Image: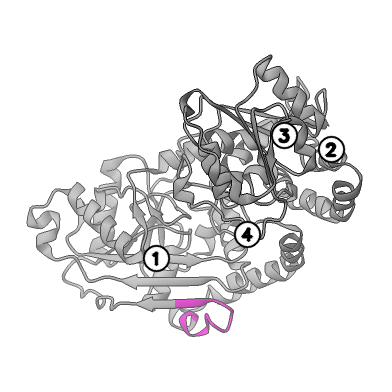
Amino acid sequence: MPPCVPNNSSMASCSPIFQEIQTVVADLDGGLLISPNPFPYFMLIAIEAGSLLRGLLLLLLSPLIHLLYTFVSEPTAIQLMIFISMFGLKIRDIRTTARAVLPRFYAADVREDSRQAFSGMYGRRIVVTSIPTVMVEPFATDFLGADRVLGTEIDVHPKSLRATGFVKTPGVLAGRWKKSAIKQEFGEESPDLGIGCGASDHDFVSLCKEGYIVHPDNSSAIPVNPDDLNLRLIFHDGLLVQRPTYLNAIITYLWNPLGFILAIIRIFFLVPLPLSIMHRLSSFFGLKLITRGLPPPPPSSGPPGFLYVCNHRTAIDPLVISVALKRKISCVTYSLGHFSELMSPIRTFRLSRDRGTVTARISALLKEGDLIICPEGTTCRQPFLLRFSALFAELSDRIVPVAVNIRQGMFFGSTARGWKSMDPFLLFMNPRPTFEITFLDPMPTEMTCTGGRPSIDVANHVQRMLGCTLGFECTTLTRKDKYMMLAGHAGVVDHSSKMEPTKSQ
């Protein structure tokens, strides 16, 4: 058996000379990740691909799972988590969750020392794990640069394409089965480097020319800088803000009934109030509104209205801006949920895909007064700004950039795959959501299309201004990029009533 060094600092010494011909095999749980406990990721599958009830069942059985995992058998505990979290789910939903939800939590748990050793210029990078391959593969290949994932293979019914809750032969890939899988993968050759965690990984590490066992005490482990991963995390989906560890999951489920009641009170008792009263009572209802900058006064009856151009964080951004201004301002939307449209105290107009119709309608609305528009076209949760559509720059030279940031401690109030009608409920279920609205100075005429600037330059300039104000990075990604990555489609919404107002002022 090759030498196995039982301390974290030894990972820094892993620097083969001929890296281009080297191969590395690394265990995911505890080897590449700081935490060896896979429970949070099964909880995410149970909730995001299944339901809150399925997640509750997994949580109620977590004491038994912990006992099995710690004192009896790791494979038995993992098989139980697989059955509870996946039984009856469509394999398509599990894959989508693994691609859209799990990478954010995996990325925050990667060890810096192990990642450096794994991501060197090796000929092949293999991840081995007892977790189902379908859960790990999107993150391992895209963010860690793995060439292959050797993991537990779940059984899928051939006709319904639903998970049966069981695993294929030889079972959960743990202990000696990891060694067998690596032997089958490499044949008579031996991997050059093996990275494992705990005594159970000595079997597969013994096959490697050089082996490293990461110390199980992760208190001194340093998480990786997300920018150092192979792929930057810009888009993600899912309900939960915090990793659903045992403690976080218990707190979340205990809060759910209270949070739902609080959301109903906020939506049905606070939102219908006049905006000036809503502004004064927001803190009483647990909402924190921070307003910066000096917005322009309401337009007179002569000139057209101001066009408030903001980045997009949640579905209620226009409402929050109106509350900050203490007056109703119409907004244009693309895929707002029907419930959000119904409950909105401000006028909302749906956008169509027809440029001529959109241009005519927005121009007419600006003649009536101020208007709010989100040229990103969709929400982004991470500190990035998507590409701004240049259409707004062609329609007005009275542009007021507005920087919007919303902090949510427990639930995300936006989704790409779920029911959009639940977005306001989830947002208002947070114990104390914080809304930060910053009004920038109106754009000088010479910086608009009226002053001779191309519309694309104006849109890019506004994007950079908002990005600088928020500390966000500007990108050229679009709504289509987001939905293709998270939901597997272009995010096209077909509205039967394309540009009709959804609520009178």
> Disc 3 versus disc 1: distance between alpha carbons?
39 Å
Q: Residue 220 shows which numbered tag?
A: 4
Q: Rounded to the nearest whole Å, what is the CA distance between mark 2 and mark 4? A: 28 Å
Instruction: Decide which of 268, 193 is in the foreground and name it.
Output: 193
Can you identify the residue that label 2 sits on? 75
* Residues drawn in magenta: 278-289
Judge whether 61 appears above or below 326 on screen.
above
- Asked if the residues shown at circle 3 and circle 2 are in contact, with their CB atoms under 8 angstroms apart, the answer is no
Relative vertical location of residue 264 with respect to residue 11 in this rendering, above or below: below
Q: Secondary structure at mark 4?
A: loop
- Vertically, is 93 above or below 105? above
- Colour logic: one colour
Question: Cα distance, mark 2 to mark 1?
Answer: 47 Å
> To which residue does mark 3 refer?
132
What amino acid is labelled 1 in the image?
A: Val
Q: Name the residue that disc number 1 marks.
A: 404
Disc 1 secondary structure class: strand
Nearest to viewer (mark 3 / mark 1): 3
Q: Nearer the viewer, mark 3 or mark 2?
A: 2
Q: Element at badge 3?
A: strand
